[in-house]
Image (spheres, rainbow, N blue to C red):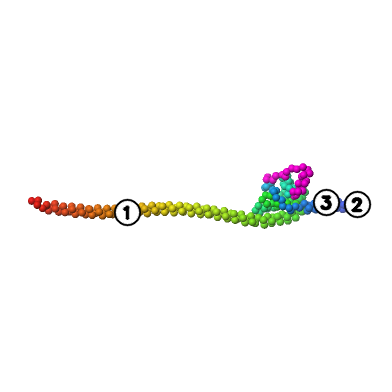
């Protein structure tokens, strides 16, 4: 009896081991690294922007799934809300996400750019999935370096453009003030010349008036003396 029980346990363990081995092999064979363009990322924040793949017939759906690979599968599962988003990292327009499908204990690792999936790899090995995700994150950082540098240059150029615009406006204001000052100075100079000419004319008139006054005073004095002395031949 004990021998029969042990034999049954051994057979059961063999069946379970074979099943697990088959699942592992199938998971390894399902890894897909071919770039795919035109699909959108699966982050929860982007889920509302996702659209379900077009419906096809039973035979066409299988062929299409094989042709599009894990990207189409991941998109459909996101659309059906079957995945749990574990991690997501952004670097510039690039990003990496790690999803988990609890029903089959399967991890999906996705690399995307500008909200479009680029690569999708799935695995039932959590350690391997984390390693792939870490590699994708590092890759996004390397790919985003030029974008980040470009963003800095754009900000610097925009700042310099604003400074130039402010400087040009300041220069125009100063030039306008200088033009007004020059115009006013010219008017002041002209007014000074006019006033100076009037002053010269007035001085000359004053001199003539003074001379005329002196002459009149002399005549008055002469007439006064004559009046006081009496006119000659008056007797």
Q: Residue at x 73, y 56 (%)?
A: 131
Q: Nearest to the eye among marks 2 and 3: give it.
A: 3
Residue 94 visible? The answer is: yes
Mark 1 and mark 3: Cα distance apart in space: 120 Å
Q: Residue at x 73, y 49 (%)?
A: 71
Name above or below for residue 188 compared with residue 48: below
Disc 2 target residue: 4
Q: Nearest to the eye among marks 1 and 3: give it.
A: 1
> Under tag 1, what secondary structure?
helix
Residue 87 visible? The answer is: no
Disc 1 target residue: 197
Of marks 1 and 3, which one's residue comes earlier in the chain? 3
> Residue placed farthest to the left in the image?
235
Mark 2 and mark 3: Cα distance apart in space: 23 Å
Disc 3 target residue: 19
Q: Residue at x 89, y 52 (%)?
A: 7
Of marks 2 and 1, which one's residue comes earlier in the chain? 2
Which sits in the foreground, 50 or 1?
Answer: 50
């Amino acid at each position: 009896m004990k021998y029969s029980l042990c034999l049954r346990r051994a057979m059961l363990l063999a069946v379970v081991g074979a099943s697990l081995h088959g699942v592992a092999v199938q998971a390894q064979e399902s890894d897909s690294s071919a770039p795919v363009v035109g699909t959108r990322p699966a982050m929860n924040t982007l889920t509302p922007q996702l659209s379900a793949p077009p419906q096809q017939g039973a035979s066409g759906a299988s062929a299409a799934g094989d042709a599009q690979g894990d990207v189409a599968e991941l998109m459909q599962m996101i659309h059906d809300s079957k995945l749990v988003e574990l991690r997501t990292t952004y670097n510039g327009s690039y990003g990496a996400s790690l999803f988990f499908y609890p029903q089959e204990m399967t991890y999906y690792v996705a690399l995307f750019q500008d909200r479009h999936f680029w690569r999708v790899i799935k695995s039932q090995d959590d350690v391997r999935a984390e390693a792939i995700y870490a590699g994708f994150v590092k890759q996004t950082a390397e790919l985003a370096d030029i974008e980040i540098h470009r963003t800095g240059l754009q900000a610097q150029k925009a700042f310099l453009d604003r400074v130039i615009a402010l400087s040009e406006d300041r220069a125009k204001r100063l030039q306008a003030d200088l033009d007004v000052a020059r115009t006013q100075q010219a008017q002041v100079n002209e007014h000074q010349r006019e006033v100076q000419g009037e002053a010269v004319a007035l001085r000359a008139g004053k001199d003539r008036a003074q001379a005329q006054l002196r002459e009149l005073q002399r005549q008055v004095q002469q007439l006064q003396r004559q009046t006081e002395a009496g006119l000659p031949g008056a007797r």
